[in-house]
Amino acid sequence: ATLLAILLAGCALGAAAYFIATQRAGQLNNAGAPAAASPMNEAPPSEAAAAKSWKITGALSEACTCSVPCSCNFGEGPSPHSYCYPFYSYHIRKGNYGDVVLDGLQFGSADLSGGRHMFMDERATERQREALRIIMARVIERVSVDDSEKKAKEIAGEIQYVRIEQQYDERKNLLKVAGVGEFAADYIMGLDKSSPVVVRNNTTWRIQDSIKAKTSIYKARIGRDVVDTKATNSNQGDFEYTDAMNFGGAVRWNCGACANRMAHGEGEQSCHK
């Protein structure tokens, strides 16, 4: 009996020692292993990624040399000419690039026979200019996210920083850009005579609903590039853009120099990238 008691006591001590050793090993393994991922301890987005995040909402005002309605907006070539020279501005009602506020600023371009002449609101600070150049690379030059910073540096010296006056209401729009030109247009009213004609999802401008208008004046002059016309097409519409959007390749007809080469008989030109 005494021998049996000794054996049982030994077994109990061995089991206890094994249990303690196992627990200690488990504690060491848990302490050395990384914690399981959870929403509470996931790493926040990097500052660099956050800085490149942007969103702008506002209104596009545009006029071109095509008759009303601009056939380019419906996936066709320009009319009545073999070229389409648009002049346009984006007014940012609310926007930001990272922590850079862009509210109230404007940017745009006049795409004439000699090429693209981009401009930006002269009121923009240096940080706002840097942010808008990247946005212009995406929205106007239509490059990818990966190429946007490189393109922004390339176009920095080409952009004019000028006074921009862009107005629009329920009946008309107007754009005046110092050193570039101006246009004014009246909306084309529908049968009810109280609301304008609206085209949804046109093929040229990334605006969901485009109000159709006819210019009373459209003049632009940059060096030897001159436009002086009226009774041409105009578009007015709201936009909402973000860095996550795919702006696609360059628009075929709204690309000044290429369209001009085609107009002068050098063969059909494509401005797709």
Image: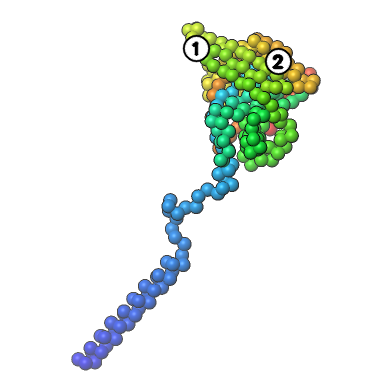
User: In the picture, residue 1 is in which quadrant?
Assistant: bottom left
- Give the secondary structure at mark 1: loop
Q: Residues within 10 Å of mark 1 (few under 14, many from 20)?
A: some
Compare residues 249 and 155 and report the one nearer the observer: 155
Indicate the amino acid at tag 2: Lys
Q: Locate residue 223 relative to residue 163 in the image: left or right.
A: right
Q: Give the residue drawn at x 73%, y 16%.
A: 227
Judging by the rendered image, the residue that carries numbered circle 1 is: 195
Q: Give the residue drawn at x 43%, y 51%.
A: 39
Indicate the amino acid at tag 1: Ser
Judging by the rendered image, the residue that carries numbered circle 2 is: 219
Disc on the earlier residue, 2 or 1 = 1
From this view, report whether residue 247 is shown above or below residue 15. Answer: above
Compare residues 121 and 236 and report the one nearer the observer: 121
Query: Visible in this render: residue 52?
Result: yes
For this orientation, the residue located farthest to the left is 1
Q: Residues within 10 Å of mark 2 (few under 14, many from 20)?
A: some
Q: Give the residue drawn at x 68%, y 32%.
A: 273
